[in-house]
Image (spheres, rainbow, N blue to C red):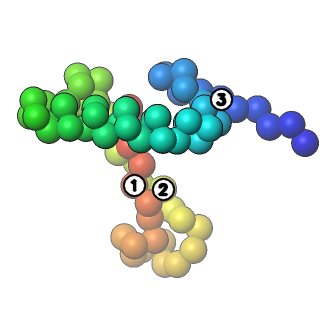
């Protein structure tokens, strides 16, 4: 079975990140250190929506039965 990999706004597909794990980890670490040093985040990251998604198990009335995702 062939899988189609779809990228998000960054145009980076998951397979690329997995194949270059060490390089990506170094890049992300550098990016996060810069964010902390400058005490600010990218403007795009400030505009997001938080959604609670039911995990499909447990009591729907309990907060722990939901996972929060952030849409940028």
**In-image side of 29 versus 2 (left or right):** left
User: Which quadrant of the view contains residue 47?
Assistant: top left
* Residue 64, visible in the rendered structure: yes
Q: Quadrant of the C terminus?
A: top left
3D distance between C-alphas at marks 3 and 2 = 21 Å
Q: Which residue is pictured at 60% across the width and 32% down the height?
A: 16
The residue where tag 2 is placed is 53
Distance from Cα at disc 1 to Cα at disc 3:
22 Å
For numbered disc 1, what is the local secondary structure?
A: strand
Q: Position of residue 64 (x, y in %)?
A: 39, 73
Q: Earlier in the sequence, mark 3 or mark 2?
A: 3
Q: Would you name the residue on which mark 1 appears?
A: 68
- Circles 1 and 2: CB atoms closer than 8 Å: yes
Q: What is the crowding at mark 2: few (fewer than 14 residues within 10 Å), some, or many (at least 20)?
A: few
Q: Is residue 1 left or right of residue 15?
A: right
Residue underneath mark 3: 6
Number of numbered discs visible in the structure rendering: 3
Q: Is the Cβ of the residue at disc 3 closer than 8 Å to that at disc 2?
A: no
Question: Mark on residue 5?
Answer: none
Q: Is residue 61 above or below residue 14?
A: below
Q: CA distance from mark 1 to mark 2?
A: 6 Å
């Amino acid at each position: 079975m062939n899988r189609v990999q779809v990228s998000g706004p960054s145009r980076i597909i998951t397979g690329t990140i997995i194949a270059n794990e060490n390089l990506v980890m170094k890049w992300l670490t550098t990016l996060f250190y810069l964010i902390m040093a400058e005490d600010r985040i990218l403007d795009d990251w400030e505009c997001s929506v938080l959604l609670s998604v039911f995990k499909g198990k447990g009591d729907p009335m309990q907060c722990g039965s939901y996972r929060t995702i952030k849409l940028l």
